[in-house]
Image (cartoon, rainbow, N blue to C red):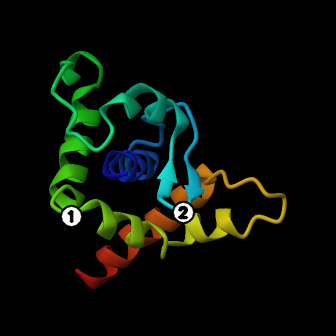
Amino acid sequence: MKLQCLCYYAQAWSLVFNNKQLFTSTFQATESGVLNMELYKKYRHFGWNGIPDVECVSDIYTDDELCLLYEVWDVYGKEDRMFLKNFVQTEAPWLKAVRNKHGERIINEYDMTKYYGSLVNKIIEVD
């Protein structure tokens, strides 16, 4: 669950700051917070155990993407899975996906960009 939330935030902030996806598959609003099926399928065999460092991320991501991932970790990584789940479930993109009348709970990337981009604008106004 924590991995899912961290990747969700990485996706959201990449859409805001880099204007591109980090993950091509979508995130869904679920009872557990968010779910990216591609990530789930890849890492589900670890269950509740930690995921060992098996890949060299510098071979997968650009320097800008790595910088963003480290920032996401610095901000959200210290939080436990329940905090992240509860936090995600209070935010507009998740809430909008849950209220979708068509039964699809896909979290729209435009909604992510709009919502998290507005948070950046609020921070800039405060400074």
Name the residue at 23% across, 62% down.
80
Instruction: Residue type at mark 2: give it.
Output: Glu
Name the residue at 66% across, 66% down.
98
User: Real-space Cα distance between discs 2 and 1?
Assistant: 18 Å
| Above or below, 39 relative to 31 | above
The residue nearer to you, when weighing 81 against 102, is 81
Which residue occupies the extreme bottom position in the image? 126
Which residue occupies the extreme right position in the image? 102
Instruction: Give percent across and percent down for residue 61.
Output: 29, 25
| Above or below, 38 relative to 13 | above
State which mark lies toward you, 2 or 1: 2
Neighbour tally class for label 2: few under 14, some 14-19, many 20 plus, Cα within 10 Å: few
| Above or below, 123 relative to 71 | below
Q: Circle 1 sits on which residue?
A: 79
On residue 31, the disc is 2
| Residue 96 in the figure: left or right of residue 58 | right
Name the residue at 83% across, 65% down.
101
| Above or below, 65 relative to 12 | above
Q: Classify residue 95 by image quadrant.
A: bottom right
Instruction: Give percent across and percent down for residue 34.
Output: 49, 54
